[in-house]
């Protein structure tokens, strides 16, 4: 029995080794023939998240093909796991837009593993001079969105100089008609409700509150903990409860894409106290909406809640 | 489920596979890790020390998360913690080398504490949370040239150390008492071996994740040792299987988007089942013939 199995094992080894040799020879041969994909219009653009991707798509118009990686409104982008196909699209894009600020390290890794001299990368955090630990939800800041729009247009113009005029016109159209209702709503809320105290579930609301001139009373450490998926401290939870019980906040805003049991409890308490509750989401909802349509519907709900709370 | 691109034309598939630099690096890193894990794992299985290997893998998790917490590369955490863990386990072990009962309790204790530390580091470092799955279950996406060079250098170092101690180690593994009587420094050899295992575990963790280290470190050697008792042949078979599981697993993951930790482990497991199934059938037929 030993002798027979030994002979069989020998045959198996030979088969294994033959396959190994074949793979070793085939691998590098095709590797050397790789790379250098022909660059042809339209510009291939990949955005790590669809809120940035939507803006880029509207600015680039017909001269680019824009793909966004994180699009599912039912998952939390903070805990996104990159798939091989994501890395593949990042590796083959000529223009890559990532958020940075620790929000999408998987995208940064994909960029590092695929060095390219022809690719342009826009890291929103770097554009705004922010680093890890700062608030990553800059698409909720109207001023950051403005800076993003000008940078994307400049990048597209550099990527395809013959289309510079087209991209300039696209930008003007986006600013004057696309973003017009968004800016109008922000101005309206700011003039009517500036200084109104509100509460929130997490730091995604902070840039919005700043942009609207609302006073966000929730402790920043609580907002940060919920956004990052860590446990808020007992003292912070107590402070939040007190603000609800004493009706110090007029409206409570929470992220429905990241609503932990803690947040659910606050929402219930706020409703019990007659405090209007409104939601925001991390990414575009519905996934097919444009950036401005999504923001406008959130802002309208927030304005309605403020109206109910203040009677103004 | 197949992503665009997979065809039955092997040439075009291989071309697609190596079209992007991240896949070239994944194959480079995977090849280094498979060879290192196959060879070192072969001794680990021979010495019945899989549990120590598992503990070192668990230690890799706080190593990596701790390194990211203090802001250095995760690779340093993997190597530093695994080697330190190996030295602790090697130092704590007392008495005859054949006594494994006490050792497993010590090893289990170290393991529980290591896992707890890893969890603490992850909690302390805000924002790392998205990477926990990668640390535990592996990822071949985003391996840089520098990481490949580190893997290659450490892997070579570990294999050279293994080559130096290979003969006394095999002797001490088969019969520690006779080896000690013949003047083999059993204690030193087994501690050096633990460090070598630590390096292999640290390397493998970076591809398969801390929890799936065994898919390359234990499964292929265990399968190979079931195929044949000839040492050189079974060690070669272990390496071949680890390589095959890694190469094919990476390709399947690339074309289907299934996680590589799953595809690599499943291939290694399938080979294990096949070999044991074939052995079972062979002995069954043998018994039938004897009965007749």
Image (cartoon, coloured by chain):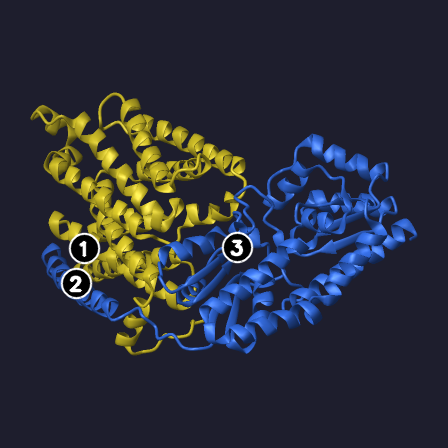
Chain colours: A blue, B yellow
Judged from the image, the secondary structure of the residue bearing numbered disc 2 is helix
Regarding mark 1 in the picture, which secondary structure is present there?
A: helix
Along the line of sight, the residue nearer the viewer: B160 or B233? B160
Frontmost of labels 2 and 3 is: 3
Q: Position of residue B45 (x, y in %)?
A: 24, 43
Q: Is residue A162 visible?
A: yes
Neighbours of disc 2 within 10 Å: few (<14), some (14-19), many (20+): some
Mark 3 surroundings within 10 Å by alpha-carbon count, few (fewer than 14), some (14 through 19), many (20 or more): some
Name of the residue lying farthest toward the left? B182
Residue B285 spot, x, y in % from top left: 21, 62
- Residue that carries the numbered disc 3 in the rendered image: A80
- The location of residue B49, given as percent across then percent down, is 27, 37
Q: What chain is tagged by disc 2?
A: A
| Residue that numbered label 2 is attached to | A12
Q: CA distance from mark 2 to mark 3?
A: 42 Å
Q: Secondary structure at mark 3?
A: loop
């Amino acid at each position: 029995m030993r002798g027979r199995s030994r002979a069989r094992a020998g045959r198996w080894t030979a088969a294994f080794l033959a396959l190994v040799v074949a793979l070793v020879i085939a691998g590098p041969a095709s590797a050397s023939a790789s790379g250098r994909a022909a660059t042809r219009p339209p510009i291939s653009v990949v955005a790590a998240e669809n809120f940035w991707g939507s803006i880029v798509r509207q600015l680039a118009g017909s001269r680019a093909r824009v793909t966004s990686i994180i699009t599912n409104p039912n998952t939390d982008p903070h805990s996104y796991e990159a798939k091989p196909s994501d890395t593949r699209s990042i590796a083959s894009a000529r223009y890559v837009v990532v958020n940075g600020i620790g929000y999408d390290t998987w995208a940064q890794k994909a960029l590092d593993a695929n060095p390219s001299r022809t690719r342009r990368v826009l890291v929103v955090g770097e554009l705004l001079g922010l680093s890890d630990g700062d608030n990553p939800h800059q698409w909720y800041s109207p001023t950051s969105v403005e800076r993003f729009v000008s940078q994307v247009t400049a990048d597209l113009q550099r990527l395809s100089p013959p289309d510079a005029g087209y991209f300039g016109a696209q930008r003007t159209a986006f600013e004057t008609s696309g973003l017009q209702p968004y800016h109008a709503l922000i101005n309206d809320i700011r003039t009517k409700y500036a200084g109104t105290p509100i509460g929130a579930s997490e730091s995604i609301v902070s840039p919005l509150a700043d942009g609207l001139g609302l006073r966000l009373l929730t402790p920043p450490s609580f907002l940060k903990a919920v956004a990052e998926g860590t446990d808020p401290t007992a003292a912070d939870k107590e402070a939040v409860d007190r603000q609800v019980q004493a009706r110090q906040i007029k409206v409570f805003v929470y992220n429905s894409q990241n609503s932990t049991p803690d947040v659910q409890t606050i929402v219930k308490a706020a409703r019990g106290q007659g405090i209007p509750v409104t939601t925001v989401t991390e990414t575009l909802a519905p996934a097919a909406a444009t950036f401005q349509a999504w923001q406008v519907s959130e802002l309208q709900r927030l304005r309605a809640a403020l109206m109910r709370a203040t009677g103004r | 489920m197949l992503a665009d691109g997979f065809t039955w034309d092997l040439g075009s598939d291989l071309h697609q596979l190596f079209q992007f630099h991240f896949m070239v690096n994944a194959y480079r890193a995977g090849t280094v890790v498979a060879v290192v894990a196959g060879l070192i794992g072969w001794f680990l299985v021979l010495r019945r020390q899989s549990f120590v290997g598992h503990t070192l893998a668990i230690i890799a998790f706080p190593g990596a998360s701790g390194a990211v917490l203090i802001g250095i590369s995760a690779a340093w955490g993997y190597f530093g913690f695994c080697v330190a863990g190996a030295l602790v386990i090697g130092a704590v072990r007392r008495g005859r080398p054949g006594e494994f009962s006490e050792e497993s309790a010590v090893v289990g204790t170290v393991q529980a504490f290591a896992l707890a530390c890893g969890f603490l580091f992850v909690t302390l470092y805000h924002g790392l949370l998205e990477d926990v799955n990668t640390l535990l279950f592996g990822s071949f996406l985003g391996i840089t040239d520098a990481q490949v060079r580190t893997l290659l250098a450490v892997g070579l170092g570990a294999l050279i150390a293994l080559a130096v101690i290979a003969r006394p180690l095999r002797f001490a593994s088969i019969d520690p008492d006779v080896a000690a009587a013949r003047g083999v420094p059993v204690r030193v050899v087994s501690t050096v071996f633990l460090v070598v295992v630590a390096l292999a575990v640290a390397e493998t963790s970076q591809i398969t994740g801390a929890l799936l280290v065994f898919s390359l470190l234990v499964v292929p050697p265990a399968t190979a040792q079931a195929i044949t008792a000839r040492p050189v042949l079974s060690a070669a078979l272990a390496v071949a299987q680890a390589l095959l599981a890694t190469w094919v697993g990476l390709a399947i993951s690339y074309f289907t988007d299934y996680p590589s930790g799953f595809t690599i482990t499943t291939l290694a497991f399938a080979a294990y089942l096949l070999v044991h199934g074939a052995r079972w059938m062979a002995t069954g037929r043998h018994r039938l013939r004897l009965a007749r």
